[in-house]
Image: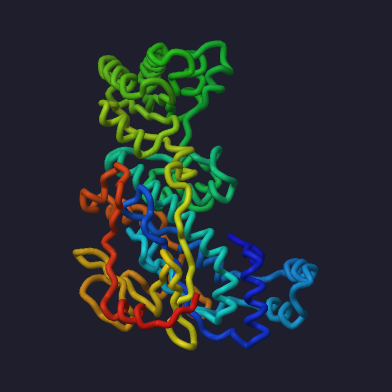
Amino acid sequence: MPKALFTDLYELTMAYSYFKRGLNTPAVFDHYVRPPVRYRRFLVFAGLDSALSFLENLRFSQEDLAYLDSLGLFDWHFLDYLEAFRFTGDVWAMDEGEIVYPGEPLFTVEAPRIEAQIVETALLNTLNFETLIASKAARVLLAAGREASVVDFSPRRDHGEDAAMKVARSAYLAGFDGTSNTEAGRRWGIPVVGTMAHSYVMSFPDELTAFRAFAEDHPRPILLIDTYDTMEGLEHAILVAKELEAQGRRLVGVRIDSGDLPELTQKVRARLDEAGLSYVKIFISGDLDEYKIRDFKAAGGVAWGYGVGTRLGTSFDLPAFSGVYKLVWDADGPRIKKSPGKRTLPGKKQVWRQEEGDLVALRPEVHPGRPLLRRVMERGKRLVPAPDLAALRQATREKLFALPEEQRVIDRPQAPTYPVRVSEKLKQLQEGTASHV
C-alpha cells in the first residue's frame, strides 16, 4: 500500500498554497485513460481495492512530518494540518473487472481540494498499473482460449516486489488460473503453481534420476523435459509415469520451455497418447504472450496450459498508457482543460453501457442502459468490502469471452476505435465552459 509521502512534491507545494489562500473548497477529479491506446481494443479496470485501502488508511507519520519540515518549504500551520490529515471525500468508480474504454471516467474523487490533490500520484500509480496488467492478461487469456489454463510466471522479471504482487492479483482478476508468486497466494488466496527448473534436473546424476526423485517427493508432479533433449526427456517422463501408475498415482504433466514449440508439442502429444498416457497434460512456457500463443495455436501447437512471465509482468508491447487525473468541477462550477490534444470533459459524470457502446453523460442525466459508476466511498469510509477475488475472476472471464468477436481479436489494430460517445448536454457544457488550463 502506498505511503503518505508517495506523492510528487508539486502535489504538496500546491496543497500548501491552497491551504494558505483558503482554497480547500470541494473539488472533483476524474481518472481516465486518454484515447487512443495502441494495440488495445478494450481495457480491464483494476486497482480499486488497493486505491480504497490507501485512501481509507492515509496518514502522515511523525517521521513524514519531520522530513517535510526539513525541506524548508512549509510552515508549521500546514504541518499541523497534515498531522491531522484524513481523507474525508467520496469516490465513484467502475467495478473491478469491468470492461472499460479510453476516454471515459473510471474513478472519480470528490473531496476538499487539498485531499483530492495530495492523493493523485498514488492513485494514478495504482490504477494505471493494475489496469494495464489486467488488460494485458485478458488478451493472453483470450488468445489461449476458455478451456486453457494460464498461469502468471512473472515475478523474477517484474519491476520490483510491489509490481510483482500487483501483477499476480491483476492477472488472476482478469481470469488467470494461478501464479508462481507464493506471497501473492498467501495474501489473496490465489492458487499457487510450480513445476521445476532446469537446475533441478542438472543437480542429479542424470535426468531419469531427477524425474524419479521429483515424482517421489511431490504429489502432483509436472516434469520439465527440455533440459537436454526434449524427446529423450519425454521418454524418461513416460517411464516415470508408468512407475507412478503402478503405485496408483499419475503424472500430471510435462513442461516444455524451449525449441520449436508447435512441432515439439505435436510430437509429445502423439507419443504420450501412443503410450496410453492421454491424461498427461502438456504445459509450455518461454517468453509467451498473446501474440506467441496465437501463433503457436495457428501452427498446430497442442498445449493444456501456458506459463506467461516477462511479457505479462512488463506489459511488453504496451508498457504504459496515458492514464490521467484531471480537475473537472469545483465550487465555482465545471472546469475544463483545453490544451490541444488534451481537452477534458467538465462536470460530474456517469457512464451508461448501451448496446451501441458507452455513453458519457452528466450525472443528473438518465439514459437507457446500465450505469457503470457507483459510489464506493463516502466521507472517507469505503462502502464496498474487499472483493471475493475468485468470484471476481469468474465474472471477469465471463465478460471477456462474451465480448463481440471484433474486440476479442488479438491482432494489433492500426486505427483503434472505441464505442465511447458523449451526451448532447455534456457536449454543450464542454463547448460553453470557460478555459482553465
Nearer to the camera, 136 or 48 = 136
- Image coords of residue 404 (percent x, y): 21, 52
Nearer to the camera, 268 or 190 = 268
Q: Quadrant of residue 252?
A: top left
- Image coords of residue 64 (percent x, y): 73, 67
Q: In which quarter of the image is residue 341?
A: bottom left
- Image coords of residue 228 (percent x, y): 48, 14
Residue at 40 percent of width and 77 percent of height: 346
Q: In this view, does 329 lie above or below 97?
A: below
Q: In which quarter of the image is the N terminus?
A: bottom right
Q: Is residue 377 in view from this perspective?
A: no
Q: In this view, does 3 lie to the left or right of 134?
A: right
Q: Is residue 259 in view from this perspective?
A: yes
Residue at 28 percent of width and 40 percent of height: 145
- Image coords of residue 98 (percent x, y): 34, 60
Q: How is the rendered protein coloured?
A: rainbow
Nearer to the camera, 78 or 239 = 78
Image mark count: 0
Q: Is residue 173 above or below residue 346?
A: above
Query: Which residue reaches farthest front?
Result: 340
Residue at 55 percent of width and 68 percent of height: 120
Q: In this view, does 130 lie above or below 345?
A: above
